[in-house]
Image (tube, helix red, strand yellow):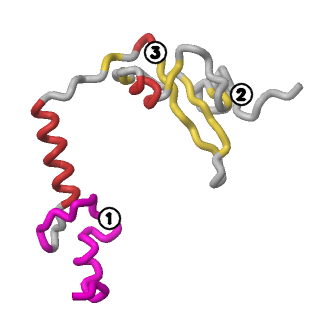
């Protein structure tokens, strides 16, 4: 019987990080997203292991795993943090060329709102 492709529990082939195939990680290890669903965060701990799988776009992809026992609760949203987040989101929607709130996050490759990026293609 052959072992799965990404089976490396001692980390010999992956830089010292224990590696497991998709859905074969030991109990007690969770991804950031799984921790967040439980109301937790990694809390500064190092990566305990990783899960790797073959991507449909070529190559392999990792998902880092953290210990549940070392996870900390998510910090609560304070009014100051909410205000800072709103200010950052407004800045992402404000066009630097015309200064208006576009109502959507500006495309990074354009750097401006769509009407400013292609003024000739907009029928007036």
Residue at point 67%, 30% (across, down): 21
Please tell me whether residue 85 is drawn above or below residue 106 in the rendered image.
above
Residue 2: percent from the left, percent from the top? Answer: 85, 28
Quadrant where the N terminus lies? top right
- Mark 2 falls on what kind of element? loop
Please tell me whether residue 100 is drawn above or below residue 31 in the rendered image.
below
Query: Is label 2 or label 3 in front?
Result: 3
Task: Determine which quarter of the picture holds residue 101.
Answer: bottom left
The magenta segment:
98-124
Residue at point 16%, 68% (across, down): 96
The residue wearing badge 1 is 107
Residue at point 26%, 60% (across, down): 104
The residue wearing badge 2 is 7
- Mark 3 falls on what kind of element? helix
Q: Which one is nearer the viewer's eye here, 81 or 123?
A: 123
Please tell me whether residue 118 is drawn above or below residue 83 in the rendered image.
below
- Mark 1 falls on what kind of element? loop
The residue wearing badge 3 is 68
Q: Are marks 1 and 3 in contact (CB under 8 Å)?
A: no
Q: Residue furthest right?
A: 1
Residue at point 62%, 35% (across, down): 52
């Amino acid at each position: 019987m052959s072992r799965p492709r990404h089976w490396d529990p001692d980390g010999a082939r992956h830089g010292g990080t224990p590696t497991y195939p998709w859905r074969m990680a030991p109990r007690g290890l969770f991804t950031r997203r799984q921790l967040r669903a439980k109301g937790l965060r990694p809390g500064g701990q190092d990566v305990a292991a990783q899960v790797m799988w073959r991507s449909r776009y070529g190559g392999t992809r990792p998902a880092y795993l953290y210990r549940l026992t070392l996870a900390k609760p998510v910090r609560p949203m304070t009014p100051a943090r909410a205000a800072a987040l709103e200010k950052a989101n407004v800045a992402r929607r404000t066009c630097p060329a015309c200064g208006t709130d576009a109502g959507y996050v500006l495309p990074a490759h354009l750097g401006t709102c769509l009407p400013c990026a292609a003024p000739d293609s907009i029928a007036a």
